[in-house]
Image: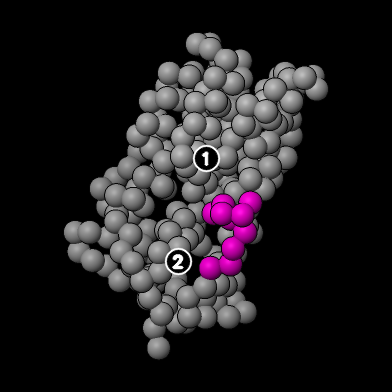
Amino acid sequence: MRLLIVEDEIRIAQLVAEALRQSGFAADAVNCIADADAVLASTVYDAVVLDLGLPDGDGLGLLAALRRKPEAPPVLVLTARDTVEDRVAGLDAGADDYLVKPFAMVELVARVKALLRRPGGPLGLKLEAGNLAFDTVGRDVTVGDLVVPLARQEVAILEHLLRRMGRVVPKAVLEEKLYGMGDELESNAIPVHVHHLRRKLIEANARCVIHTVRGVGYFLEDSP
């Protein structure tokens, strides 16, 4: 899952992005409304963490614009505005949650996960293929009773394949979902991660197999 952080304090944006990446998300960070508008026009995000005091305007304006879109991502407002009136204004403008600075990073990550667990959200499900199960909240992969340790990128690839079981997931989609803006991406990065993931699933005797559609992408299906 890919998240957008709109925060003009660079250090806070970096710390939030790193915490979300450590929790298995891809995270992009921008520091103004103009940049946020640009990336939202070209990239699909699963959630947005939004500061309100931005250098080129009030984040409430961006929030209102997001809410006019038919499939807007959930928004967690992260701000120093701490009065009851401020919180009510943010929630009335369409925020799904509201967190006041200073904050505990573990709470922010927990609140983001809670947003994504809401009905229709991408978290809160157990995804299965054969004897393999993936807990989308705990990010644990098991084959039978065996916990299979996977790298973050391998977990992300497996999740996308599970969510589209039997359908081809283009390589370009995996690149977009796994890597944030500015991340260095080598042309063979996805094939290498898929190779390692496939090997680990075979070693764990998983009854599912990853197929490669040359020049297109990958799909997952049950195996006997």
Q: Secondary structure at mark 1?
A: loop
Q: Which residue is mark 2?
A: 162
151 lies left or right of 139? left
At x 47% / y 75%, what residue is drawn? 129
Amino acid type, mark 1: Pro
Q: Secondary structure at mark 2?
A: helix
Percent x, y of residue 35: 42, 22
Seen from the viewer's position, the closer of residues 183 and 118 is 118
Amino acid type, mark 2: Leu
Q: Are marks 1 and 2 in contact (CB under 8 Å)?
A: no
Q: Is residue 202 above or below residue 81?
A: below
Label 1 vs label 2, nearer the camera: 1
Percent x, y of residue 16: 60, 33
Furthest-bottom residue in this view: 224
Crowd band around label 2 with a 10 angstrom C-alpha radius: few (<14), some (14–19), many (20+): many
Q: Earlier in the sequence, mark 1 or mark 2?
A: 1
50 lies left or right of 103? left
Please give the label number shown on residue 49: none
Percent x, y of residue 61: 54, 19
Percent x, y of residue 136: 58, 60
Crowd band around label 1 with a 10 angstrom C-alpha radius: few (<14), some (14–19), many (20+): many
Q: Which residue is mark 1?
A: 73
56 lies left or right of 193? right
Q: Is residue 83 above or below residue 99?
A: above
Seen from the viewer's position, the closer of residues 25 and 185 is 25
Q: Looking at the image, can residue 11 be seen?
A: no
- Assign the C terminus to one quadrant of the image: bottom left
At x 45% / y 25%, what residue is drawn? 36
The residue stretch that appears in magenta: 118-127
